[in-house]
Each structure stands twice: as C-alpha cells, then as structure tokens.
C-alpha cells in the first residue's frame, strides 16, 4: 500500500466516514498565509521544484540545517537543483516530523507521485515534477482552481502598495484574495532607525504627515480604510505577549517624540506605546466590523550569527515561555469595557498555554457565534499532536462546533494539502470520540459540525469567500 492512501491518518471506520463523506469535498478558505500577491497577479509558473518548494520555506531550511547541509544549499546561491537534492537527502530523516507528511501529500496531490522521496529517486522526481510544473494546472491560478480555494487572506504591511491586490481583483478569478493589515513595526520605538524609516514610508503610503503622534495615528487609520476598500476585514499582530500598560495620550506622545528624535524607548516605554497603538487599532477594527488576529509567544531570531547575515524568518525561531494570561486578559478587557472589542482570534505558540487561551476566549463571548476564537495550532504546533491538543482544549472548555478551522500560514502555493492534513486529523479525533462513546454515533449531527469547521464557520465569521 502507498504511504499516502485514501485512509491516511484515519484510524477507524467513523473517522473514515467523517472524512470521505463530510470533510474531503469542502472548499478552502485560507485566512492566514504569507503568499506573494505579485505571483497571483501574474499567474506565476514555476521553473522547478526548488522555486515552488524551497523559496522562503523556513520549516524546510530548519530541517536541512539539522541534517548538516551547508547554508549555501539552504539559503545561499547554490544551483536550484543542488538545493533540491539537499532537501531530498533530508526528507528520509524527517520521519515523525510533519514535514514528512506534508512533503508526500504535496507530491501526490500536485504531481501524482506516490513514491517516497529520497536521494535514490531525487533526480527522477525532479524531472517528473518539472514537466508537470510546465502545465497550466500547476500555474498559481491552476493550483487555486484545483484545490477549490474560495478565498485567501495574505499578510500585508500597511506601508506596502495594494496594487497587486487591485490587479488580482480585476482578473475575475474565482479565488478572492484579500489583504490582511499587519502593522507590527508601528510599535518599534525601541529601534528608532527601524521605526522612523517605517513611519516615513507610512506617511508616503497614507498621505498623512507622521511627524506627530496624532498624524501617525491618522496615517494608520487611513491605511485601515485603504485595506477595507480592498476587501480586507482582518488584521494580524504578533508579539511575545499582549501589551497591557496603557499610558495617557500625552505619555504616548512623549515616547513617540523621543523615538522620532532618534532616542530608543526603554522596554517599559515600548510596552506602553504598543498598548496605546493596539488599543487605538482595536477600536478601529471594531467600528469597521473586522476581526483581529493575535499571534502570541514565539521567541524570534535566536541565532545572531545567521540573523546578521540573512535577517528574520529564516528558521531560527522557537517556542517562547512568556506569561500570557494576565496581560491578555487586561488587553481584551480594555477594549471590551467600551464595547469595542472586535472579533478576535488568539493563537499561542506554546502548547502549555492551550487552556489559558481557550478559557480566556470564553470570557469575552457574546453577540457573534464564537466571537473570540481560540485559533488553530500554530507554527511549531501545527502538526497532528499539536492540532489535537488545541482542539481538545477548545472542545473541553468552549464550543468546538464554532471553531473556524485551519490555515496554512505558508509561503508556498504547494501547501494547500495542509488543509487535508488538518481535516484528516480532525476526523480522526472526532471519529475516536464516536468509537468510544464520547459523542453520539450520529453522522448528521457530527458530520455537520465537521463540515462547518472545514469551511463554513470561517466563511461566516469573516464574511469572505
């Protein structure tokens, strides 16, 4: 039997029935990813597997380093085929890692290749996949059609142009593509050189002078409106833990002026300024009917040597261990007290915080089904065990039936089979519950929940797709 077979990861009859009859055919709404919109706008075709599989994929880079491959074959200027061969040497060593599952799901679903990738067949797979990549079915638009991707929400810095999004909208393709507002540099007052360069670019993008805090906030609001006009209904933010030390307006202005003058904010001042910005943005989102994503807990850029050479997002980030509950509760409550807490999706990088996040979400519900979501297993936890832990915590403390499901968080157009991976994991978990009597042996009831988690909950929650 092939490794990727029809009942892959489905351990019992109930799981198999849930997947094949209820989950498999649902469309995809990928509401958080890092896909390049320029590639969608021009319907990019990829020259080889290295282009489509290894560009920007820090999951693979991390594994290749662990396998002892030289950096030149990972992020360097080596020949693309040599980079792919280095990845093929690594794959047999990823047993137990989700990369092994993702790799072989993608080979089967995109290229019809059922053999296990390794150094002995890498040359043949390189050639076979290359021939398939030359066909329209594996252009960017072809992939979106074949996987029935109804909507994508990309991740976009507010200082960047939205021209690619506007160009995609004019194409009339079935997949709707929306920007997501990601203003993480807006509180980087501890790094004046970074902050001031970003603030100047924000001024250019918005048409507002950002020399004062009032102008800076007006520029952020202008860009929120620009994103809204492009169909965005979603923001995204990431930090170790929530900012929860709220300054007065005058205090925030003093911190802003100091940074604009080239003086680094102290750590406490940076947290206060971040709280001021996030409170302002949260209110904007609530008034416009947006959802706010909070990605909390990663410890980034641990390897100084590689960071100095290549920068961020290169596979040198890990799970952090910051306290979360008190700050998260204070931040959400600050907005909720004035009735301006937007729909919010909480993601934790550290699985130890599962019950913290799941129960915190339950404190701020009302008015909208699943208004505050405990988001899917993220980053280091978006594998089978991590996703099961997240769903169990949500089911045991909240409403799994209102969960808005999975996303790829990916930079690769080959990653859509990760939705299948999630759906198989979901069905296997719930199938075990049926087999053991935890939930009823009622496939209309339970299958309906599975279908909603796969697509409709997210579509209704975000009003997209």
Image (cartoon, grey):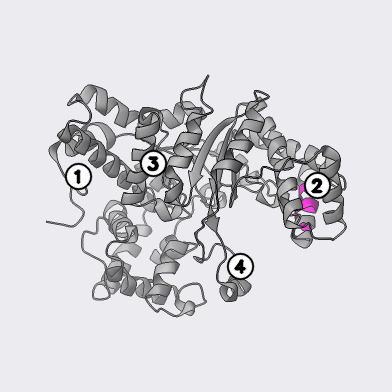
| Mark toward the start of the polypeptide (4 vs 1) | 1
What crowding class fits label 3: few (fewer than 14 Cα within 10 Å), some (14-19), or many (20 or more)?
some
Give yes or no for residue 68 being in the magenta stretch. Answer: no
Residue 336 vs residue 23, the one in the foreground? 336
Question: Is there CB contact under 8 Å for labels 2 and 4?
Answer: no
Mark number, residue 145 = 3
Whether residue 242 can be seen here: yes
Q: Disc 2 marks which residue?
A: 203
73 left or right of 322? Answer: left
Mark number, residue 311 = 4
Label 2 SS: helix
Q: Kindly indicate the quadrant of the structure image that contains residue 437.
A: top left
| Mark toward the start of the polypeptide (2 vs 4) | 2
User: Which is more foreground, mark 2 or mark 4?
Assistant: 4
User: Which is more foreground, mark 3 or mark 1?
Assistant: 1
38 left or right of 249? Answer: left
Label 1 SS: loop
Residue 418 rendering spot, x and y as whole percentages: 35, 49
Question: What is the magenta range?
Answer: 197-204
Q: CA distance from mark 2 to mark 1?
A: 53 Å
Please report the residue visible at 20 percent of the width from the left and 25 percent of the height from the top: 440
Residue 274 vs residue 309, the one in the foreground? 274
Q: Is residue 241 above or below residue 367?
A: below
User: Which is more foreground, mark 2 or mark 1?
Assistant: 1
| Mark toward the start of the polypeptide (3 vs 1) | 1
What crowding class fits label 1: few (fewer than 14 Cα within 10 Å), some (14-19), or many (20 or more)?
many
Give yes or no for residue 203 being in the magenta stretch. Answer: yes
Image quadrant containing the N terminus: bottom left
Please report the residue visible at 57 percent of the width from the left and 47 percent of the height from the top: 155
Mark number, residue 10 = 1
Whether residue 174 can be seen here: no
């Amino acid at each position: 039997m092939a490794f990727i077979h029809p009942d892959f990861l489905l351990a019992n009859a109930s799981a198999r029935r849930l997947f094949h009859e209820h989950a498999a055919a649902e469309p995809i709404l990928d509401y958080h990813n890092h896909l390049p919109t320029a590639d969608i706008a021009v319907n990019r075709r990829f020259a080889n597997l290295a282009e489509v599989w290894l560009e920007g994929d820090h999951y693979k880079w991390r594994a290749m380093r662990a396998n002892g491959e030289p950096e030149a074959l990972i992020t360097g200027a080596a020949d693309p085929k040599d980079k792919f061969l280095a990845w093929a040497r690594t794959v047999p060593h990823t047993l137990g890692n989700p990369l092994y599952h993702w790799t072989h799901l993608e080979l089967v679903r995109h290229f019809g290749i059922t053999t296990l990738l390794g150094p002995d067949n890498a040359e043949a797979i390189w050639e076979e996949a290359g021939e398939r990549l030359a066909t329209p079915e594996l252009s960017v638009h072809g992939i979106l059609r074949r996987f029935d991707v109804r909507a994508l929400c990309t991740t976009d810095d507010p200082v960047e142009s939205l021209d690619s999004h506007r160009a995609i909208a004019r194409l009339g393709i079935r997949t709707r593509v929306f920007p997501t507002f990601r203003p993480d540099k807006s509180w980087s007052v501890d790094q004046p050189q970074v902050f001031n360069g970003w603030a100047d670019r924000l001024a250019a993008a918005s048409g507002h002078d950002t020399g004062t805090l009032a102008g800076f906030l007006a520029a952020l609001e202008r860009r929120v409106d620009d994103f809204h006009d492009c169909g965005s209904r979603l923001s995204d933010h990431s930090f170790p833990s929530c900012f929860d030390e709220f300054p007065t307006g005058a205090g925030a202005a003093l911190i802003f002026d100091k940074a604009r003058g080239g003086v680094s904010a102290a750590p406490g001042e940076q947290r206060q300024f971040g709280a001021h910005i996030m409170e302002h943005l949260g209110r904007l989102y609530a008034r416009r009917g947006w959802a706010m994503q909070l990605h909390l807990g990663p410890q980034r850029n641990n390897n100084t040597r590689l960071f100095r050479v290549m920068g961020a997002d290169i596979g040198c980030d890990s799970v952090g261990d910051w306290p979360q509950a008190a700050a998260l509760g204070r931040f959400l409550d600050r907005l909720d007290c004035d009735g301006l807490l937007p729909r919010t999706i909480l993601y934790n990088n550290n699985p130890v915080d599962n019950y913290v996040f799941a129960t915190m979400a339950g404190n701020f519900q009302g008015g909208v089904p699943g208004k505050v979501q405990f988001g899917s297993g993220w980053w280091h936890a978006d594998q089978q065990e991590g996703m099961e832990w997240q769903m169990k915590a949500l089911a045991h403390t909240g409403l799994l039936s209102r969960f808005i499901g999975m996303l790829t968080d990916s930079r690769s157009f080959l990653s859509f089979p990760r939705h299948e991976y999630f759906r198989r994991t979901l069905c296997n978990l719930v199938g075990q519950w049926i087999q053991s009597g935890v939930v009823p042996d009622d496939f209309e009831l339970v299958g309906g929940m599975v279908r909603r988690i796969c697509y409709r909950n997210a579509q209704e929650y975000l009003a997209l797709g």
